[in-house]
Image (cartoon, grey):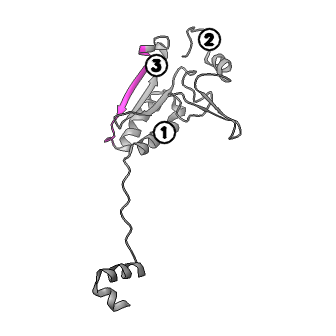
Protein backbone atom coordinates (compact mmCIF):
# COMPACT_ATOMS: atom_id res chain seq x y z
CA UNK A 1 0.00 0.00 0.00
CA UNK A 2 2.98 2.32 -0.28
CA UNK A 3 2.23 4.32 -3.39
CA UNK A 4 1.81 3.70 -7.05
CA UNK A 5 3.89 6.73 -7.91
CA UNK A 6 7.60 6.78 -7.25
CA UNK A 7 7.72 10.55 -6.97
CA UNK A 8 5.63 10.71 -3.77
CA UNK A 9 7.79 10.85 -0.68
CA UNK A 10 6.96 8.73 2.31
CA UNK A 11 6.69 11.88 4.44
CA UNK A 12 3.97 13.29 2.19
CA UNK A 13 2.20 9.95 2.18
CA UNK A 14 2.28 9.87 5.99
CA UNK A 15 0.84 13.38 6.24
CA UNK A 16 -2.03 12.35 3.96
CA UNK A 17 -2.96 9.11 5.71
CA UNK A 18 -2.02 9.61 9.34
CA UNK A 19 -5.50 10.70 10.38
CA UNK A 20 -7.37 7.88 8.65
CA UNK A 21 -6.12 4.59 7.26
CA UNK A 22 -7.06 0.95 7.31
CA UNK A 23 -4.58 0.04 10.05
CA UNK A 24 -5.46 2.83 12.51
CA UNK A 25 -7.23 1.91 15.76
CA UNK A 26 -8.51 4.83 17.83
CA UNK A 27 -9.61 4.40 21.44
CA UNK A 28 -11.40 7.26 23.20
CA UNK A 29 -11.69 5.43 26.52
CA UNK A 30 -7.93 5.44 27.12
CA UNK A 31 -7.46 9.16 26.53
CA UNK A 32 -7.41 9.07 22.74
CA UNK A 33 -4.65 6.49 22.35
CA UNK A 34 -3.99 5.40 18.76
CA UNK A 35 -2.69 1.97 17.80
CA UNK A 36 -1.85 0.28 14.52
CA UNK A 37 -2.74 -3.16 13.16
CA UNK A 38 -0.10 -3.04 10.44
CA UNK A 39 1.75 -6.38 10.31
CA UNK A 40 4.98 -4.50 9.57
CA UNK A 41 4.66 -2.45 12.76
CA UNK A 42 6.82 -3.90 15.55
CA UNK A 43 5.37 -1.91 18.44
CA UNK A 44 1.76 -1.48 17.23
CA UNK A 45 2.04 2.26 17.90
CA UNK A 46 0.53 4.64 15.36
CA UNK A 47 3.75 6.51 14.59
CA UNK A 48 5.63 7.49 11.44
CA UNK A 49 8.73 5.60 12.54
CA UNK A 50 7.00 2.25 13.05
CA UNK A 51 4.37 2.22 10.28
CA UNK A 52 5.37 -0.31 7.64
CA UNK A 53 3.09 0.75 4.82
CA UNK A 54 4.59 4.25 4.75
CA UNK A 55 8.30 3.42 5.02
CA UNK A 56 10.26 2.02 2.11
CA UNK A 57 11.97 -0.39 4.48
CA UNK A 58 10.02 -2.11 7.23
CA UNK A 59 10.29 -5.12 9.52
CA UNK A 60 7.50 -7.31 10.85
CA UNK A 61 7.46 -10.27 13.24
CA UNK A 62 4.36 -12.44 13.53
CA UNK A 63 3.56 -15.82 15.04
CA UNK A 64 2.79 -18.52 12.48
CA UNK A 65 0.03 -21.11 12.81
CA UNK A 66 2.62 -23.89 12.93
CA UNK A 67 4.05 -22.63 16.27
CA UNK A 68 6.86 -20.74 14.63
CA UNK A 69 7.83 -17.10 14.14
CA UNK A 70 7.93 -15.33 10.77
CA UNK A 71 10.21 -12.38 10.03
CA UNK A 72 8.96 -10.24 7.15
CA UNK A 73 11.01 -7.50 5.55
CA UNK A 74 9.89 -5.10 2.87
CA UNK A 75 11.91 -4.88 -0.35
CA UNK A 76 12.07 -1.22 -1.39
CA UNK A 77 12.73 -1.74 -5.09
CA UNK A 78 9.68 -4.02 -5.43
CA UNK A 79 7.20 -1.62 -3.82
CA UNK A 80 4.95 -1.64 -6.89
CA UNK A 81 5.02 -5.45 -7.26
CA UNK A 82 2.88 -6.85 -4.44
CA UNK A 83 3.87 -10.48 -5.06
CA UNK A 84 7.58 -9.68 -4.73
CA UNK A 85 7.37 -6.83 -2.22
CA UNK A 86 8.14 -8.91 0.88
CA UNK A 87 10.84 -11.32 1.97
CA UNK A 88 10.05 -13.81 4.73
CA UNK A 89 12.16 -15.96 7.00
CA UNK A 90 10.77 -18.47 9.49
CA UNK A 91 12.18 -19.47 12.86
CA UNK A 92 10.76 -22.73 14.20
CA UNK A 93 9.60 -23.16 17.76
CA UNK A 94 12.62 -25.39 18.43
CA UNK A 95 15.05 -22.58 17.52
CA UNK A 96 16.73 -21.31 20.70
CA UNK A 97 15.80 -17.74 21.59
CA UNK A 98 19.31 -16.33 21.32
CA UNK A 99 19.81 -17.89 17.91
CA UNK A 100 16.54 -16.39 16.69
CA UNK A 101 17.48 -12.94 18.03
CA UNK A 102 20.90 -13.16 16.39
CA UNK A 103 19.28 -14.15 13.09
CA UNK A 104 16.89 -11.21 13.26
CA UNK A 105 19.68 -8.75 14.04
CA UNK A 106 21.97 -10.20 11.36
CA UNK A 107 19.31 -10.05 8.66
CA UNK A 108 18.19 -6.51 9.48
CA UNK A 109 20.34 -4.15 11.52
CA UNK A 110 23.80 -5.50 10.64
CA UNK A 111 23.04 -5.23 6.95
CA UNK A 112 22.10 -1.57 7.36
CA UNK A 113 18.40 -2.34 7.02
CA UNK A 114 16.57 -0.16 9.57
CA UNK A 115 19.19 -0.37 12.32
CA UNK A 116 16.99 1.95 14.40
CA UNK A 117 14.48 -0.88 14.86
CA UNK A 118 16.98 -3.39 16.28
CA UNK A 119 15.80 -3.22 19.91
CA UNK A 120 12.13 -3.21 18.92
CA UNK A 121 12.62 -6.25 16.68
CA UNK A 122 14.34 -8.24 19.43
CA UNK A 123 11.68 -7.22 21.97
CA UNK A 124 8.90 -8.27 19.59
CA UNK A 125 10.67 -11.57 18.91
CA UNK A 126 10.92 -12.18 22.64
CA UNK A 127 7.20 -11.49 23.12
CA UNK A 128 6.22 -13.74 20.20
CA UNK A 129 8.50 -16.52 21.43
CA UNK A 130 6.97 -16.28 24.90
CA UNK A 131 3.43 -16.40 23.48
CA UNK A 132 4.25 -19.57 21.53
CA UNK A 133 5.22 -21.47 24.68
CA UNK A 134 2.83 -24.15 25.84
CA UNK A 135 1.44 -23.46 29.28
CA UNK A 136 2.08 -26.07 31.96
CA UNK A 137 -0.62 -27.27 34.27
CA UNK A 138 -0.08 -26.28 37.86
CA UNK A 139 0.55 -29.27 40.13
CA UNK A 140 -1.88 -29.85 42.97
CA UNK A 141 -0.79 -27.90 46.06
CA UNK A 142 0.68 -29.98 48.87
CA UNK A 143 -1.05 -29.82 52.21
CA UNK A 144 1.15 -28.46 54.94
CA UNK A 145 0.90 -28.13 58.71
CA UNK A 146 -2.37 -28.83 60.45
CA UNK A 147 -4.33 -29.51 57.25
CA UNK A 148 -1.88 -32.28 56.34
CA UNK A 149 -2.11 -33.79 59.79
CA UNK A 150 -5.91 -33.74 59.66
CA UNK A 151 -5.95 -35.27 56.18
CA UNK A 152 -3.62 -38.08 57.25
CA UNK A 153 -5.62 -38.53 60.46
CA UNK A 154 -8.75 -39.26 58.45
CA UNK A 155 -6.83 -41.88 56.48
CA UNK A 156 -5.83 -43.57 59.72
CA UNK A 157 -2.13 -42.77 59.62
CA UNK A 158 0.05 -43.09 62.71
CA UNK A 159 1.35 -39.55 62.35
CA UNK A 160 -2.07 -38.06 63.03
CA UNK A 161 -2.47 -39.98 66.28
CA UNK A 162 0.88 -38.90 67.65
CA UNK A 163 0.48 -35.17 67.05
CA UNK A 164 -3.14 -34.86 68.16
Magenta highlight range: 83-95
Looking at the image, do the residues carrying marks 3 and 1 touch, with CB atoms under 8 Å apart? no
User: Relative to 40, does residue 84 appear above or below in the rendering?
Assistant: above
| Spatial separation of the CA atoms under disc 1 and disc 2 | 30 Å
In this picture, residue 32 sits left or right of residue 114: right
- The residue that label 2 is drawn on is 8
| Spatial separation of the CA atoms under disc 3 and disc 2 | 17 Å
The local secondary structure at tag 2 comes to loop
Res. 145 visible in picture = no
Residue occupying image coordinates x 60% and y 8% = 7
The C terminus appears in which quarter of the rendering? bottom left
Looking at the image, is mark 3 or mark 2 earlier in the sequence?
2
In this picture, residue 62 sits left or right of residue 26: left
- The residue that label 3 is drawn on is 75
> What numbered label is drawn on residue 124?
1
| Image location of residue 152, percent across then percent down | 32, 80
Splitting the image into 4 quarters, where does residue 28 fall?
Answer: top right
| Image location of residue 75, percent across then percent down | 46, 19
Amino acid sequence: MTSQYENISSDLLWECVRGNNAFLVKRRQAGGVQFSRDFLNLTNKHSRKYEGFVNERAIGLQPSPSASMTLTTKIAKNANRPAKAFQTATFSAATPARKAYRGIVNSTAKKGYRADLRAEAVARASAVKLSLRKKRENPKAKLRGRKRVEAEGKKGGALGEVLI
